[in-house]
Image (cartoon, rainbow, N blue to C red):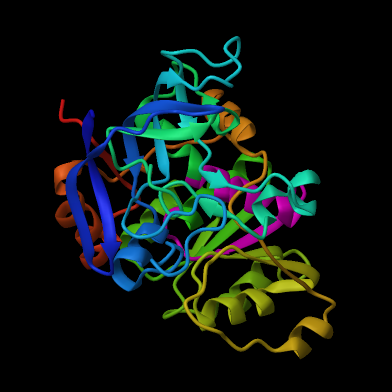
Amino acid sequence: MATMKAAVYYGKGDIRIQEVPVPEPTGDQVQIKVEWCGICGTDIHEYHDGPVLVPNVDKPHPITKATLPLTLGHEFSGTITKIGPDVDKEKYKVGMRVCAEPIITCGECKMCKEGFENCCPKLGWIGLADHTGGFAEYALARQFRAHPIPDSISFEIGALMEPLSVAWHAVRVSNIKMGQTALVLGGGPIGIMVLRVLLAIGARAVYLSEVSGSRKALATKSGAKAVFDPRECDVVEECKKASVHGLGVDVAFDCAGVQASITTAINAVRPRGTIMNVAIWEKPIQISLNDMALGEKWLSGCICFADDFPAVIAAVADGRLSTDGLISGHIEIDDLVEKGFNAILNEKDKHVKIIARPIKK
């Protein structure tokens, strides 16, 4: 049996680079030779606090039946090397350059049938709920989850299509309109990507709240109208002063996921404005429903993506959506823990997105 190098997650603080069997495609799966795979905040949470989304040994994932240990990685790109027997051979061919849309869904529930697969009750992710994640030489994806990328998009940038699709989806479902204004709370990878997507779709002005010096600089470089440091100013008042009517921004996106950020988001939007929660929270929080009710404000949430990859790939390919400066580090898979996970945990302000490749070149 052929083997390959992979980053296998055994539990909190335990990722091992080891040899595992090369996964073979079945049914409508394609095998992808991975070129690059990005480290996601979700991966960091699993390493530092997990298992969170990864199924524990006593509770297998309902679709894949996977449990610990498993190969991490869900932000990856590469080349199709094999195809399963049920794959559309006219559409998917060996040698095709692709990026993976990593969600796993049942395809049978009401949400899946209505096109909202990201809301499937059995939702899972490649690299979090199966054994064939992207931090490996080869990974698997169902054919319709392997999206072709043009030659103008490098494999490195191809690994950004997944987090960019998260940002694109958040902006799309917020229903913000061209010419409106927005506040982004948090200048981490997703916050910066939300900022760039907002500008790409025609937002008139986008403001960002952040405390990190390097992230504030990147936000400014990315086109933020103004960057507010909540330690130095009242972000709510700044948003009101910046608006033409003095009432606040049209939409606020919480990408930080802390009590202060959601409170600021609620108070920084105008009456009948929208607060979009993008963050994943570690614990319950408190919000003032009176602040929502008295201004008829709308609080909504979003998760991953739903048919957003093609639009993101097109926007990156034609230059509407910039990826400049989003990759802050390239590493080999052998260094994934020390130069990847630990570097992000210990020097978070220095990094936007670190990507890893499984085969040294």
Stretch of the chain drawn in magenta: 163-189
Residue nearer the viewer, 60 or 137:
60
Name the residue: 44% across, 72% down.
229
Q: Position of residue 243 (x, y in %)?
A: 71, 65
- Residue 159 appears in the rendering: no
Residue at coordinates 37% horizontally, 55% vertically from top-left?
217
Image quadrant in which you'd find residue 237 = bottom right
In the orientation shown, which residue stands out farthest toward the top? 90
Quick one: which residue is furthest to the front in this view?
1
As rendered, which of 287 and 283 lies closer to the eye?
283
Q: Residue at x 49, y 37 (%)?
A: 161
Residue 168 drawn in magenta: yes
Residue 199 appears in the picture as rendered: yes
Instruction: Write the residue at 51% across / 73% down.
Output: 257
> Horizontal placement of 121 versus 53: left or right?
right
Q: Is residue 136 above or below residue 240?
A: above
Q: Is residue 108 left or right of residue 206?
A: right
Q: Quadrant of the N terminus?
A: top left
- Rendered-image quadrant of the C terminus: top left
Q: In the rendered view, would you say 127 is above or below 83?
A: below
Front residue (pair 195, 74): 74
**x, y percent for residue 185:** 53, 67
Image coordinates for residue 309, horizontal then vertical, percent: 59, 35
Q: Give residue 130's position: percent from left, percent from top.
A: 43, 49
Q: Is residue 41 left or right of residue 306?
A: left
